[in-house]
Amino acid sequence: MTLDEARALDRTDPLARFRDRFALPDGVIYLDGNSLGPLTHASRAAVADCTTRQWGDRLIRSWNEGWIDAPQRIGAKLAPLLGAHPHEVIAGDTTSANLFKALVAALRIDPKRRVIVSELGNFPTDLHIAEGAVACVPGAELRAVPRAQLADALGPDTAVLLLTHVHYKTAERFDMAAWTRAAHDAGALAVWDLSHSVGAVPLDLDGANADLAVGCTYKYLNGGPGAPAFLYVAERWQERLESPLSGWMGHAEPFSFTDRYQPGPGMKRWLVGTPPMLAMASLEAALDLWAEVEMATLATKSAQLFDILAAAGDALGLDCVTPRDPTLRGSHISFRHPHAYALAQALIARGVIGDFRDPDILRLGLTPLYLSHEDVWRAGEHLRGAIEAKEWQEARHQRRLAVT
Ligand SMILES: *Cc1c(COP(=O)(O)O)cnc(C)c1O
């Protein structure tokens, strides 16, 4: 692709109008929206209002003026992006904490089923939390196997198939409906981690007959650093599962101040403690933008952006580990490179912000709401420049930072 061709695509881009909603710094091509989505003007204003007016002026009265219902209200705004009903989603806690609740609850359904099946190389917290969850349920165990052995690992002892829908390194995507069916055929529940899927690819949890799902809102959804996560529980499970984190916000009547725990109805029982309102305000404002986004349009542009960088990588002889078929991937592209860390740092020094995933992956996020085709074309030129000049050799690019 040439620069002129990229610009021609930008002129007819139906998503171009969203760029102005974001407060992106000048001189930066941001290819890390899959890790921390950028600030929206709406979130900045919402946090200012939450601080100054709601907290500053209204003080504790704000709990009855919209705060206390925020987890449900934001859950309902997330639902269309997940292919869920509004009453099947709640916002709160972290993805890690929600996964713990989901896994322990699912392990307690049937004492004959004690095994969580998951994928080796899954995002670390998924396996770490699964380890913690099985330690809380007598006899339970984690069976983590390579992707090719997942189907064989399911059996009459399986309680849960835990999968991350889009892989954080390679962007490979599982067929949600097919793998949910495989779990159900084995008599197990399907629990999905959608951290790299929501806001990246079209989702249909209800259509896939999924059981539970969790995910982040600070990546493609731009909710803010450490923004509250979400939990989905299919309606048919809501009254049959119990959260192991029986906090007062999940109680049927928190303000009756009773000694005994009585789980609330529907998704309420999955709440734990007091919601973080500044973070909720940022998230809710960022989500309002998504009500205007057509996911099919987003997917089309994501594929166009992918093709630009894939072609740049091919011309350089780079090893692309992301599937070429857009239906088999999420919305980032990853290249394997022996000096991937230093290469990522060299790109950052050029104003192209992507990231590195240990041991050898250069990961570049493709977020159609604020990236133009020209931006991505220019990123490809920087990639070429950095590689041709062997910029990874520079000592300053090799110093390992805490967050990669
Ligand atoms: C980013 C990510 C997480 C992060 O979990 P936190 O609890 O928010 O730290 C979890 N799972 C996957 C698959 C992720 O990509």
Image (spheres, grey):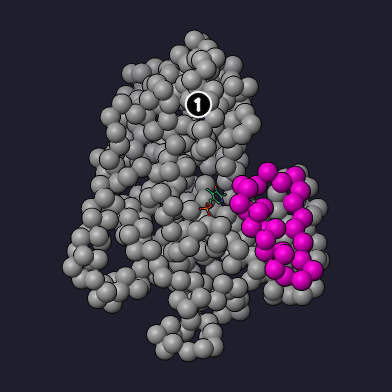
- Tell me what residue is drawn at x 74 percent, y 75 percent: 110
Vertical relation: 70 (above or below) 306: below
Q: Is residue 184 visible?
A: no
Quarter location, residue 291 = bottom left
- Tell me what residue is drawn at x 63 percent, y 53 percent: 126
Vertical relation: 193 (above or below) 56: above
Vertical relation: 369 (above or below) 307: below
Q: Magenta region: which residues?
A: 120-146
Side of 275 relative to 240 (left or right): left
- Tell me what residue is drawn at x 52 percent, y 17 percent: 395
Quadrant showing the N terminus: top left
Q: How many marks?
A: 1
According to the picture, the residue beneath numbered tag 1 turns out to be 344
Asked if residue 53 is among those painted magenta in the image, a careful observer would answer no
Asked if residue 127 is among those painted magenta in the image, a careful observer would answer yes
Q: Is residue 165 visible?
A: yes
Q: Is mark 1 within 8 Å of ligand 1?
A: no
Residue furthest to the top = 389
Quarter location, residue 209 = bottom right
- Tell me what residue is drawn at x 59 percent, y 22 percent: 339
x and y percent of residue 379 in the render? Answer: 42, 23
Q: Nearer the viewer, residue 282 or 286?
A: 282
Please, what is the three-letter code of the amino acid marked with disc 1? Ala
x and y percent of residue 397 in the render? Answer: 50, 22
Side of 331 relative to 160 (left or right): left
x and y percent of residue 249 in the render? Answer: 45, 76
Side of 267 relative to 188 (left or right): left
